[in-house]
Image: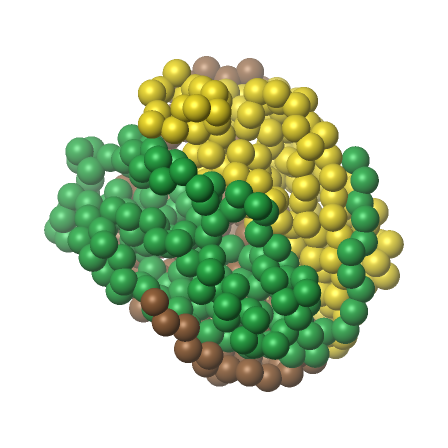
Chain colours: A green, B brown, C yellow
Amino acid sequence: MTITTLHHGPVTRQATGRLTVTTQGGDMVPITGAVQDWVKETGIRNGLLTCFCQHTSASLTIQENTDPDVRLDLMDALERLASTKESYRHSLEGSDDMPAHIRTSLTDTTLSVPVLNGRALFGVWQGLYVLEHRSRSHQRIIILQLTGT
Amino acid sequence: MTITTLHHGPVTRQATGRLTVTTQGGDMVPITGAVQDWVKETGIRNGLLTCFCQHTSASLTIQENTDPDVRLDLMDALERLASTKESYRHSLEGSDDMPAHIRTSLTDTTLSVPVLNGRALFGVWQGLYVLEHRSRSHQRIIILQLTGT
Amino acid sequence: MTITTLHHGPVTRQATGRLTVTTQGGDMVPITGAVQDWVKETGIRNGLLTCFCQHTSASLTIQENTDPDVRLDLMDALERLASTKESYRHSLEGSDDMPAHIRTSLTDTTLSVPVLNGRALFGVWQGLYVLEHRSRSHQRIIILQLTGT
């Protein structure tokens, strides 16, 4: 195990943004490109980017960004882990609502990614996605916060 | 998909706090209000708040803040996913200990929330909770860290 | 519930590092010591440390740092939750690949830990681990980012 220091520098500035995305229902929407564009636009070259999902029936995750089957398999796995066929106390908002809350807790509401030379440091195979756990289309809001220089 | 920049400003200060909470056992304790009060008290108006749970059998999550049934259903779901009836190698500390460790890994030890105009930007339906995965009462410590201006 | 402020101070600097680790396959590699050493080396005494795993079939988690059985039980639990015996669409890279992607989403890609007096504030029983979800050995990269003073 080795650790190499890549960068040392000042911290002086921050930016906050609001990303609005329309989901289809039961889908995963890629937002990596839009987020990278916003990082560039802020002019902050080095620092830490945080993405925060303001919902309890949609969430964030980082997943394989190439084979669309991965996303289908992940959503199937979440259905097995928190099924719409299970019986729940909280059922007034539909059989997909409580599973959506559970799947949100099992995945991520917050994700932070280091930024270097104007780019969030996602790995080659990593994509950032908004997970829509409800079965219908929704408008979802992700807050972006970038601290650095 | 659109991104709107809400804020651009300096970063100059930080504060660190320690939240102490007594759980009942198998419960979810809401801490949103206490955390918002502390953010206000620091005088830091814009930045990033991070909450860090110092335990491996208790954790954090963001959940629906209105219907108490959601919390009961979530705790039931975690019992299905990591059951106290399963057999484990690690069993000396009680049948609820290893499930508590697994549930901690499935939920959150860290949660970061952007802060704007003196308020952590939780969504309307979002509440921040400490999850007690052990069956008895414990005193739990959450470290709060706020970077901004 | 009480909150005590432990520290108030300036934010002026940041450091970014790259940790490289070789996993064995299906194992959990402790990195707490290496990460604490790097924090000390940066000279940043107070702030926020973020660890970011650049992969989609390996991840991070914080777990009990004493009994090795806890790690075996956790890996068994992840096999039950996302089994290599399940059938998946995405199967070309081996039966352990899609389960690895799912387990990555269920655990953590990002973990942030407050730093005080030159030490990341892990609890007494907390250890930071890289989880190798593939069955063979891999080289994995974790990006470390520290903002503070």
For the point 69% across and 74% down, which residue is it?
A149
Is residue A62 shown left or right of residue A1?
A: left
Q: Position of residue B6 (x, y in %)?
A: 46, 81
The residue drawn where x is 75% and y is 66% is C14
Give the quarter of the image for residue C66: top right
The image position of residue B147, as x and y in percent, is 63, 71
* Residue C70 makes an appearance in the image: no
Q: Position of residue C123 (x, y in %)?
A: 67, 45
Vertically, is A100 above or below A10? above
- Taking the spot 52% from the left edge, 64% from the top edge, the residue there is A36
In the rendered view, tell whether residue A24 sits above or below residue B80. Answer: below
Relative placement, left or right, of C31 versus A39 is right
Frontmost residue, B131 versus A143: A143
Q: Quick check: C32 above or below B124? A: above
Which residue is at a point 23% across and 54% down the rendered structure image?
Answer: A24
| Quarter of the figure with the C terminus of chain C | bottom right
Find residue B142 and report its image quarter: bottom right
Front position in the image: B147 or A61: A61
Reply above or below: A66 against C50. above
Q: Position of residue A17 (x, y in %)?
A: 46, 74
The answer to whether any part of residue B89 appears in the image is: yes
Total count of labels: 0
